[in-house]
Amino acid sequence: MNETTIKHGTIVLLLAIAILSSIIIMASPHPMQSLKIFFTGAFSSSYAAGNMLAQASLLLLTGMGTII
């Protein structure tokens, strides 16, 4: 990976987080609590982290299947 690819990836990730955060802030009656739960909820317990990894692996396999 070259430096330009890493910079573009970082910019896209930060932009996605900013857009998602703004949607949560506009749609939620308690935006700060919602953002806290969104960003820390997946890692609150070992069960939650395992569940998140199980769902993410299925999405990754589906994505790789559509590429092929």
Image (cartoon, grey):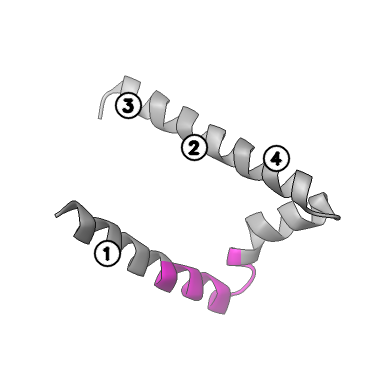
For residue 5, the mark is: 3
Q: Earlier in the sequence, mark 1 or mark 3?
A: 3
Say which element carries label 4. helix
Hey, which residue is sitting farthest right in the picture?
A: 29
Q: From the top left corner, tell me how far across and down residue 21 is, in percent.
A: 67, 43
What kind of residue is marked 3? Thr
Disc 1 marks which residue? 61
State the image quarter where residue 61 is shown: bottom left
Q: Earlier in the sequence, mark 3 or mark 2?
A: 3
State the image quarter where residue 5 is shown: top left
User: Is residue 3 found left or right of 12 in the rendered image?
Assistant: left
What kind of residue is marked 4? Ser
Q: Earlier in the sequence, mark 4 or mark 2?
A: 2
Disc 2 marks which residue? 13
Q: From the top left corner, tell me how far across and down residue 47 is, in percent.
A: 55, 79
Q: From the top left corner, tell me how far across and down residue 45 is, in percent.
A: 61, 74
Q: CA distance from mark 1 to mark 3?
A: 23 Å
Q: CA distance from mark 3 to mark 2?
A: 12 Å
Badges 1 and 4: C-beta atoms under 8 Å apart?
no
- For mark 3, does the 10 Å Cα neighbourhood hold few (<14), some (14 to 19), or many (20 or more) residues? few
What kind of residue is marked 1? Leu
Compared with residue 17, is residue 59 higher up or lower down, i.e. above or below?
below
Q: CA distance from mark 4 to mark 2?
A: 14 Å
Check if residue 63 falls in the magenta segment. no
